[in-house]
């Protein structure tokens, strides 16, 4: 029988979070979603909205409980090289705030959506996410880090045009590893990987799930 969990989600009204929260509720988990006051009405029915600032741990640390699973989904929409400052201000600051809250509260498991690395492009984005991973390691938390490169789904279909390029790259020994590490995942695959990670936490330490692992994830 599946164990139900108390889940605290940051970014629960975003591209991934707005799809993940209803899935978690349907599977019997209890979900609390951190949100700004202006977005509280967008939190999925059945989840408990909690007002706070994801960039400031002091505004939500009291709402995080010992034993929670904290899922961190905050990030800059439509990342591009022009948004380097925003990656530091939002992406990195928010995961550091979540790590602080998780450590103080004594959460059971932190789930973090990072990014595939190393990568030949998007250096500032990768650097911010790598720094977020480092914060998790430094805090000594039990965690799962998922490393997608690009999540294909509604509003994010343009990357489908690159599938033939990936197919060729996987046939060439010098580019095969990079093509696999930086491959595309669908929104469905990403959601299954998140739910699977949440329901099956690592025994301890930090577990990293790369693109092939995200694609392989299945639900019971």
Image (spheres, helix red, strand yellow):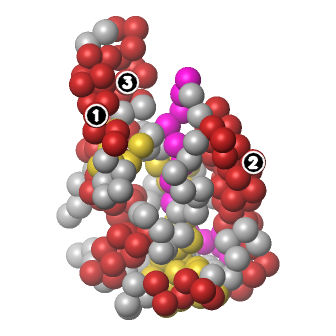
Asked if residue 119 lies in the magenta stretch, the reply is yes
Label 3 SS: helix
Decide which of 9, 39 is in the foreground and name it.
39
Identify the mark at residue 121; answer none if there is no mark: none
Circle 2 Cα neighbour tier, 10 Å, few/some/many (<14 / 14–19 / ≥20): few
Say which of marks 2 and 3 sits in front.
2
How far apart, in angstroms, are the residues tagged by discs 2 and 3? Answer: 28 Å
In terms of depth relative to the viewer, which is nearer, 29 or 182?
Answer: 182
State the extent of the magenta-drawn residues as a range. Answer: 101-120
Q: Residue at x 75, y 73 (%)?
A: 57
Asked if one can make out residue 166 in the rendered structure from this viewpoint, the answer is: yes
Instruction: Write down the residue under mark 3.
Output: 179
**Mark 1 to mark 2 CA distance (whole Å):** 29 Å
Q: Based on the displayed image, in which of its 4 quarters is residue 179 positioned?
A: top left
In the image, which disc is placed on residue 85?
Answer: 2
| Lower position in the chain sequence, tag 1 or tag 2 | 2
Q: Which image quadrant is residue 160 in?
A: top left
93 is higher (above) or lower (below) than 26 = above
Q: Helix, strand or loop at disc 2?
A: helix
Q: From the viewer's perspective, is residue 73 above or below residue 120? A: below
Q: Measure how far apart labels 3 and 1 are at the Cα level.
A: 15 Å
Which of the two labelled residues, at mark 2 and mark 3, occupies the earlier sequence position? 2
Point out the tag, 3 or 1, that comes first from the N-terminus: 1
When asked about the image quadrant of residue 123, the answer is top right
* Marks 2 and 3 close (CB-CB < 8 Å): no
The quarter in which the C terminus is drawn is: bottom left
Q: In the rendered view, does 5 fall on the left or right side of 85?
A: left
In the rendered structure, are the residues bearing label 1 and label 2 in contact, judged by CB atoms less than 8 Å apart?
no
Q: Which residue is mark 1?
A: 161
* Residue under the image location 34 percent in, 42 percent down: 158
């Amino acid at each position: 029988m599946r164990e139900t969990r108390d889940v605290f989600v940051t970014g629960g009204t975003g591209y991934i979070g707005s799809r993940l929260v209803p899935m978690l509720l349907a599977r019997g988990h209890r979900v609390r979603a951190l949100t700004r006051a202006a977005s509280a009405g967008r939190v999925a029915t059945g989840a408990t909205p909690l007002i706070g600032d994801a960039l400031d741990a002091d505004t939500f640390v009291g709402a995080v409980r010992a034993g929670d699973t904290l899922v961190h989904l905050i990030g800059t929409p439509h990342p591009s090289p022009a948004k380097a400052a925003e990656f530091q201000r939002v992406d990195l600051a928010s995961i550091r705030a979540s790590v602080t809250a998780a450590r103080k509260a004594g959460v059971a498991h932190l789930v973090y959506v990072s990014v595939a690395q190393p990568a030949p492009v998007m250096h500032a984005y990768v650097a911010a996410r790598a720094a977020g991973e480092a914060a998790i390691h430094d805090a000594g938390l039990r965690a799962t880090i998922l490393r997608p490169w690009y999540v294909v789904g509604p509003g994010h279909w343009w990357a489908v045009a690159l599938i033939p390029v990936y197919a060729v790259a996987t046939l060439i020994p010098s580019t095969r590893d990079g093509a696999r590490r930086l491959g595309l995942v669908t929104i469905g695959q990403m959601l299954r990987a998140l739910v699977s990670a949440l329901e099956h936490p690592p025994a301890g330490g930090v577990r990293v799930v790369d693109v092939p692992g995200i694609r392989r994830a299945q639900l019971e």
